[in-house]
Image (tube, rainbow, N blue to C red):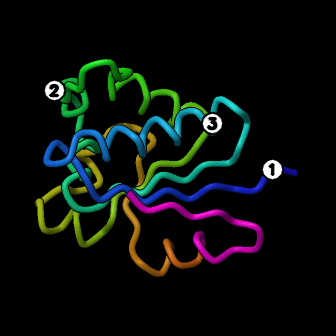
Amino acid sequence: MARPLVIKVTAGADAPERCNQAFTIAAAAVASGLPVSLWLTGESSWFALPGRAAEFRLPHATPLEDLIAVILSAGRVTLCTQCAARREIGPDDVLPGIRIAGAPTFVEEATAENVQALIY
């Protein structure tokens, strides 16, 4: 059985290459059949909102909105509770399929047996 992958992305448009790497790895892992949980924190929190990923541009990179669609098709995307609150983002504001959860849930996922965790 494949090891689950938990990815926490803290970068957004402020660090586009680092941000795109996290989404690309998550989408590639989903496409490979791995269980994936992508956490949006810090500036990446904005990508939980409809239309925000479409505004993101990085030359020679797959559009972020396409990567999010792949991840949501078979993986899990979570927006950090505190990050959402600081940006006044509520459960009704986010893309369908994205949940809002906090640190205890992240710790539970990241420390589960056989999990690999990456932070960008």
**Residue 117 among magenta residues:** yes
- 2 left or right of 98 in image: right
Q: Amino acid at mark 1?
A: Ala
**Residue 57 among magenta residues:** no
User: What segment is highlighted magenta in the picture?
Assistant: 109-120
Task: Please provide percent x and percent y for residue 104.
Answer: 47, 81
Q: Nearer the viewer, residue 18 or 6?
A: 18
Q: Nearer the viewer, residue 49 or 67?
A: 67
The residue to which callout 1 is attached is: 2
The residue to which callout 2 is attached is: 55
Please determine whether, in this image, residue 71 is positioned above or below residue 5: above
Please determine whether, in this image, residue 92 is positioned above or below residue 23: below
Tell me the element at label 3: helix
The residue lying at 22 percent from left, 24 percent from top is 54
Tell me the element at label 2: helix
Residue 30: numbered disc:
3
